[in-house]
Every structure is written in structure tokens, then in C-alpha cells.
Image (cartoon, grey):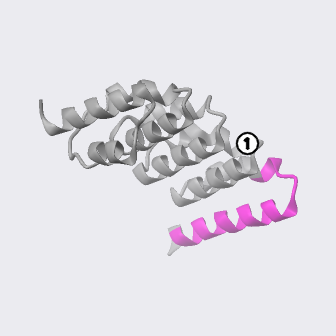
Amino acid sequence: MTFPERAVANCVLAMKEGRVSPRHVRAVLGCRKVDVTSIEPFLKSEDYFVRREAVKIIGEKGRVEALIELAKEESDKLVLMRILECVVKRKEGIDDLICLLDSDDEMVRECAIKAFRKTGNTDSLIGVLLSSDGQEMEDRIRRYMEEGDEEEAG
């Protein structure tokens, strides 16, 4: 068994037992090539800490599609924000998270707006602009869109 295989096996065992630690996560993330598909089922774990660490691993080494599927049904805002961070870092799949721009949770909505802005996908913010209740939100989104236009022109 190779080191990456052992790292994943140990992490899966720790997740099953609910005792995953940052050491387990670092061991998996430290591997250059590693198959983390066996960690994907833990994205639906009842244990918040296990789910959050699974998001971190899948976000860096796994399928972004698995995170997007989770984001569509996840209710914990910290997990959603971690998913957005991973998607921005990997620069793929952000369009599939447009539903988070309409989130009732202000922190999640704000994080989603920043994610769309960081990925240069400011056109998706038009829907937020049209459904916005506050002038402050309208002004900020208009500014984001104008900044995106200036970057493209410059």
C-alpha cells in the first residue's frame, strides 16, 4: 500500500469513528496524486466536523461536482462558505452555485457575491441587482460590475 492510499484509509477510518484530526487531513492533502473518492460519502455526514473536513479534502483533491451537489442541499453556512472558497480556488463550477446568490442567510449571500466577483463572473450578479431590496447592495453590485468591466478593458 502506497503512502497516499494509507493516508486516505487512515482518514476514512478516523471519519467513520468521528475522530478525524487536522493531522489526518494534512496527510491526505500533502499527497501529490491521491484518490479521495472514498471520502466523498462523508460529505453527507451528520457530524459537522467530519463533513467540514471532507469538504476541505474534496475541495482540494476531489471532484468539484460532489461539492456542488452538497451545496445545493447544505444548510450550514460555514460549510457553504468553505465550499465557495474551494470552488473559487479551483476556478471551476461557480456557475452551478448561482442559487447561493439568493440565500436567505446574509453571510452566505455575501460570500457567494464575493466568489462570483473573484472568478470574474460578475454578469451573474445582475439577478441579485434586480432582486435587491437595499440601495447599499445595489450600489455595491454595480461597483463590482463596473470594476469587472474596467479590468476587461484595461
Say whether residue 33 is left or right of residue 134: left
> Where the N terminus falls, by quadrant?
top left
Say whether residue 27 is left or right of residue 124: left
Residue 140 counted in the magenta span: yes
Q: Which of 90 and 18 is in front in this view?
A: 18
Residue sitting at x 62%, y 32%: 74
Residue sitting at x 51%, y 67%: 152
* Residue denoted by label 1: 102
**Label tally:** 1
Which region of the structure is painted magenta?
Answer: 129-151
Q: Where is residue 41 in the image (x, y as percent from the top left)?
A: 43, 24
Q: Where is residue 120 in the image (x, y as percent from the top left)?
A: 53, 58
- Where, by quadrant of the figure, is residue 9 drawn? top left
Q: Position of residue 67 (x, y in %)?
A: 48, 35
- Where, by quadrant of the figure, is residue 142 drawn? bottom right
Element marked by disc 1: helix
Say whether residue 122 is left or right of residue 37: right
Which amino acid does the dot numbered 1 rest on? Asp
Residue sitting at x 50%, y 40%: 52
Magenta segment, prevailing SS (helix, strand or loop): helix
Residue sitting at x 22%, y 45%: 31
- Badge 1: residue crowd in 10 Å (few <14, some 14–19, many ≥20): some
41 versus 50 height, above or below: above
